[in-house]
Image (cartoon, coloured by chain):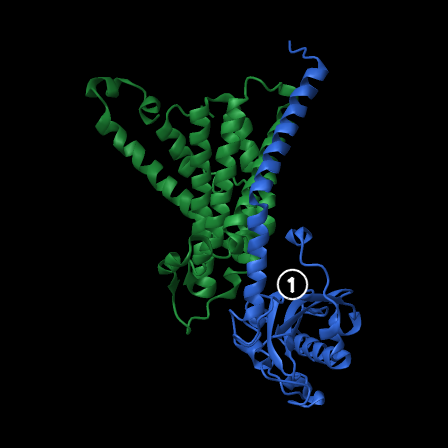
Chain colours: A green, B blue
Amino acid sequence: MATPRHYGEILSDGLWANNQALVALLGLCPLLATTTSATNGLGMGLATMAVLTASNGTVSLIRNWVRPEVRIPVYVVVIASFVIMVELTMQAYFYNLYQVLGLFISLIVVNCTIIGRAEAFASKNRVDRALMDGLAMGLGSTLVLTTLGGMRELVGQGTLFSQAHLMFGDAAKVLTLDLGEGFHGALVAILPPGAFIGLGLLIALKNLIDQRARRRVPRAVPVRAPTPTHAAAGSPGSAAA
Amino acid sequence: MNKTPMYLAALVLGSFAVAGVTLVAVTHAAMDQRILENARLAMQRKLEVIVPQGQFDNDPLEDRILVSNPGLLGTAETQVYRVRRGGQPVALILNPVVPNGYAGPIELMVSVLHDGTIGGVRVLSHHETPGLGDKIEEAKSQWILTFDGKSLGQPPPDDWAVRRDGGAFDQFTGATITPRAIVAAVKNALLFVKDQGEGLYAAPPVEPQSTKESS
């Protein structure tokens, strides 16, 4: 895959074209396990994003110093250090959320997204772009985690952001949406199968949107062709590309 | 092409390990106090809801003993917090473990007032099925509050069971095993307190909770 050239491209890669959760399908273990509510998904996503950005930046900084034969162990050390720091910080400032996400925060160490971006992007790019890539990829994953969490919470429990105050304090209670006592929901959404079904639906939706977009492009080409005479002479293949 | 001496590679890796450990150690030192304080506050909030409001003046977290009665309390070692007012006993808070939950052990917190009635029961951790067994959580259902004010005389000991077993306590639709196990565990906690009597208040407290609680 060609390396993206500018920030906009890095951002759109992370959010859409190469979304780590929907396209690369990396980091699925925490994705499936922690998305029982929108708040949990958001918390997990932000923690992952913090680690990803920090590790991308560091890996890029040291990319000319680290010998290739030890680079993977070095990345692992870097990532593990950042994960423990995030974990301690969460325990200190978001204790209640940590109680919910607990185990999965440590598991960020083995999230393939992070070592994947270190190896595929950060080790070959300037620091600013590596940081941007970390932010973009992290943001893309966070969006998917939060959306999936929201879907599961809404269908399974009839609420949205029900424990947002664990993360942002009492002010965040305004975010909470409750469909009311009468709503019993489909329990399957909260249970593990709901995670797989939900993720499947999200991937299908993304592919559908991409397909629509692709179908629209060829129709646009003749309109954009600079000079009609040349377009007629050129092969149809080049016009479509 | 890349004939790096091996020791150089080891040096690089080693220095990163040292740097990583240093960073983690610094973070830990900076956060440690705050984390301990968080854990203490969280525990305190849990204790406070199951003892009478404003009826005590000691810090139960500091007035703690360890007891051992796996038969009644489910684990090899159980914490008992003593709640007092002006030195007089008010309540005991035990944290028994229910070994026979539907999907693994359930950790409880039971407060037994000095007159033998229950001040409150809460579930600290469990692995019950979401939507069925998890109605034992206060956040999901009022069921756990039905223990408030009960004692070994009210209902009589034989009625300490779920209705399906001829007892006085409701079960939930679709989940009998979980409530059955909890009713039995709460009854056992009451039996333990009755059996030990004043000795639980009299025993000297163990060391104040120290850093090993942090994990």
Q: Secondary structure at mark 1?
A: loop
Find residue B120 and report its image quarter.
Answer: bottom right
> Could you tell me residue B110's position as x and y percent?
64, 73
On the image, numbered disc 1 is attached to which residue?
B62
Eyeballing the image, is B57 above or below A198? below
Residue projecting furthest to the front: B86
In the picture, measured across the screen, residue B43 lies left or right of residue B158, that is: left
> Could you tell me residue B93's position as x and y percent?
65, 72
Residue at 45%, 54% in the rendered image: A38
**Closest to the observer: A198 or B180?**
B180
Q: Quadrant of the N terminus of chain B?
A: top right
Three-letter residue code for mark 1: Glu
Find residue A28 and report its image quarter.
Answer: top right
Eyeballing the image, is A72 above or below A176? above
Residue at 51%, 36% in the rendered image: A52
Q: Chain of mark 1?
A: B
- How packed is label 1: few (under 14 Cα within 10 Å), some, or many (20 or more)? some
**Closest to the observer: A19 or B8?**
B8
Residue at 79%, 69% in the rendered image: B70
> Could you tell me residue A128's position as x and y percent?
42, 25
Eyeballing the image, is A126 above or below B29? above
> Could you tell me residue B42's position as x and y percent?
56, 60
**Residue A200 visible in the shown view:** no
**Residue A52 visible in the shown view:** yes
